[in-house]
Amino acid sequence: MDGTPRLGHGFRFQWEPAQQCHVLLYPEGMIKLNQSGGEILARCDGQRDIAAIVADLEAAFSTSGLRSDVEAFLAMAVEKRWLRLDSGAKT
Amino acid sequence: MNAPAKIGPPMWLLAEVTYRCPLHCVFCYNPVDFAKHEAELSTEDWLRVLREGRELGAVQCGFSGGEPLLRDDLEILIGEARQLGYYTNLITSGVGLTEARLDAFKAAGLDHIQLSFQDSSKEINDFLTHTRSFDLKQKVGDMLKARGWPMVMNVVIHRLNIEHIGRIIEMADALGAEYLELANAQYYSWALLNRDQLMPSREQLRRAEAVTNEWKEKLAERMRILFVVPDYHEGKPKKCMNGWGNVFLTVTPDGTALPCHTARMLPGLSFPNVRDSSLREIWHESEGFNHYRGTGWMKKPCRDCDKKEEDLGGCRCQAYLLAGDADAADPVCPKSPHHEIVSSALENASRPERQTQALIFRDPKESRRLSQEGETPVSAT
């Protein structure tokens, strides 16, 4: 899996104080995210490619080997259209 | 009443900013007596309502009406809502929408526009024959896309257009719609007055759903289609508003706060006004919002039903409109002692020679006339 993820058309990502979690808002709906989903989506800014996101997460949480978990989440999020994957970015 | 111990935040704040409307839709869900409630909230009132709703935890904010574009301060309200962190939705027919206005909405941060169809007996015809109405929708659609909004369309489906559903989907695709909601008319307010003309037969509905499913498959890559089945035909009460006072709070043009669009009609319940109370008091403490929360208010057959948590007895307004008793089981439920009212309406819809009256169009004059006739349930007669 390669590319640079950005939020899908019409989605907005934000911290929701009343819910105490990150959420994805879209027309007439809301998805509550767990902590890891929130941390990944917070980095899907259309600038960082997948490799950079993984590196950033691994640094932030002082760990390694996150690539496959991140890819699994991204694949699910792309399928649900939460994210679009811009291709052509260098990894 | 036995309200649930813990009341969560409202997720949805619907701001019905005006009942004024250039259109005359025969299925409009605005109250039949809307002309009696036209004293609109000021800009300041709305700004306060938006702030209080957000403090309560609401995340979705809808602007509808009437036609919300008729409020000159709409861009101010949208801007404030967006600033507060709401996801902002505008529900409009697009009539009167200009490039300049859309630019102002964009600058205000509007997230989403749903383009709905007008009185379809005429408009759908125009639309299907590629004339004025199609051109208007195309123009608005192009203006939306140019500003990065998806094209989201809503068409109310009923007997007068249901046979054209394939063509409607095809045209929506030609306009570049990314989402299409095909919402079967629900029989409240004006749609209830016109129910006999609007209700499709079981066979018509079945065919329409089959055609829609074919198109869903064909267009899966570029358009999402949602087909909303009417509860009369489904034979199953809906969990109305996802529960009374559970996620949804609507504020009407005159400031009355309601748990759903149509609850104002229920007799004996008082609903607070945002001019007198804060949204927090309204949501947590008012009689109107607490009355039908949970299941404590139920009587037979709902009280003893194993589905009572699932559907919460269906819709209170429908129970009142059809059974004349807002505490009754929703008559669409086969267990309701009043279910016959629903089945005979369906029977009538399937009869080849049906008796129907002339359509009643939503307008202020009709509204005043009908209000004078009193507030008795429309079809309990």
Image: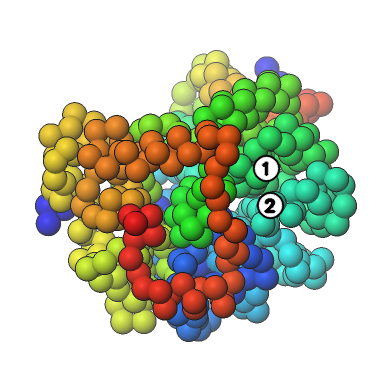
Quadrant housing residue B18: bottom right
The answer to whether residue B381 shows anywhere in this view is yes
Q: Tell me the kind of residue under disc 2.
A: Ser
Are the residues tagged 2 and 1 within 8 Å (C-beta)? yes
Q: Tell me the kind of residue under disc 1.
A: Asn
Q: Chain of mark 2?
A: B
Q: How many marks?
A: 2
Against B90, is B67 above or below? below
Identify the residue position indicated by label 2 in the image: B120
- If the image is split into quadrants, where does the N terminus of chain B sit? bottom left
Left or right: B190 in relation to B8: right
Residue B153: x and y in percent read 67, 46
| Scheme of colours in the image | rainbow
Q: Residue at x 80, y 68 (%)?
A: B98
Q: Secondary structure at mark 2?
A: helix
Question: Callout 1: 10 Å neighbours few (<14), some, many (20+)?
Answer: some
Identify the residue position indicated by label 1 in the image: B161
Residue B130: x and y in percent read 87, 47
Residue A87: x and y in percent read 78, 26
Left or right: B110 in relation to B176: left
B85 or A56, which lies in front?
B85
Q: Residue at x 21, y 59 (%)?
A: B290
Q: Residue at x 13, y 45 (%)?
A: B299
Q: Chain of mark 1?
A: B
